[in-house]
Image (tube, rainbow, N blue to C red):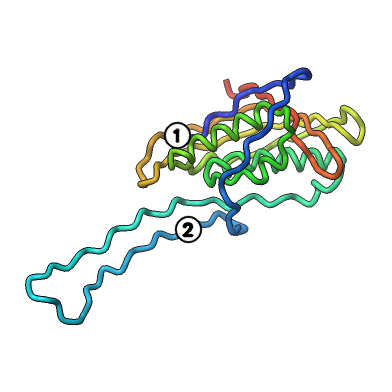
Amino acid sequence: MIPPLRSHPFARDAPRRRLARAGAAALILATTLGLVGCTQADTTPDSGPMATGAAATPSPTPTPSPTRSAQPERPAAMADATIDGAIAAATYFMSLYPYVYNTGDLTEWNALSHPECIFCASVVDGVEEMHNRGNHSVGAEMAVANAVAVELNPGHSFSVQATLSQGPTTEIDATGIVVSQTAATQTSDARLVMFWEGDEWLVRAFETSDSDG
């Protein structure tokens, strides 16, 4: 299943780590949660003559296609190196958390991850490990509330604080069997350190503390 969010505090002298490349291709996106429908092979027998004594070979039952979530949309406010831009970028980044575990598509996650972000790299490892087993997750919708930000270095670095709620999640294997699941919603207080480098946002650090006991 999607792991609960864990704290990975900012470490100024942390060794540089290269992020793994995303192994999944980007999906054709919808604006709302979409389903890739299951298909059923045609099992209607041939109406033509059949040789005497020959048995009809049943068509194989296809493996159901996994439910795929739509990629979150980048907010327009991310275009600016401002407090509002930092909040928008942090909110968008966290909305990608359930998406990458569901689809295996790490393109946007990697684009927003600073090379020294320990949390960012740990998610890449978790996603690749899950999808290499042929599994995927559903659920774990992420809600971001009460987001505020301050400038640490004007025009360059910002600290964003918010309350995150992670919904129930289910891990499913390649045959559609439920591997594990959680029923509870988990809430935490989070802090993200956001860097504006060139003309893009990067998440430098992420840390959490439980807010619901």
Residue found 58% across the figure and 42% down from its top = 100
Q: Is residue 177 depicted above or below 7 in this figure?
A: below
Instruction: Find residue 54 and report its image quarter.
Output: bottom left
Pointers 1 and 2 in contact (C-beta within 8 Å): no
| Residue 91: x %, y % from top left | 71, 40
Q: Is residue 191 visible?
A: no
User: Is residue 96 left or right of 176 when viewed as pictured?
Assistant: right
Residue wearing tag 2 = 36
| Residue 7 screen position, x and y as percent | 64, 23
Query: Residue visible at 71% across and 36% down?
Result: 113
Q: What residue is rendered at 66% in x and 23% in y?
A: 8
**191 relative position to 21: left or right:** right
| Labels 1 and 2: the sequence-earlier one | 2
At label 2, the amino acid type is Val
User: For residue 80, which numbered disc appears in the image?
Assistant: none
The quadrant holding residue 195 is top right
Residue 15 in sight in this render: yes
Q: How many marks?
A: 2
Secondary structure of residue under mark 2 = loop
Q: Which amino acid type corresponds to the residue marked 1 in the rendered image?
A: Ala
Circle number at residue 183: 1
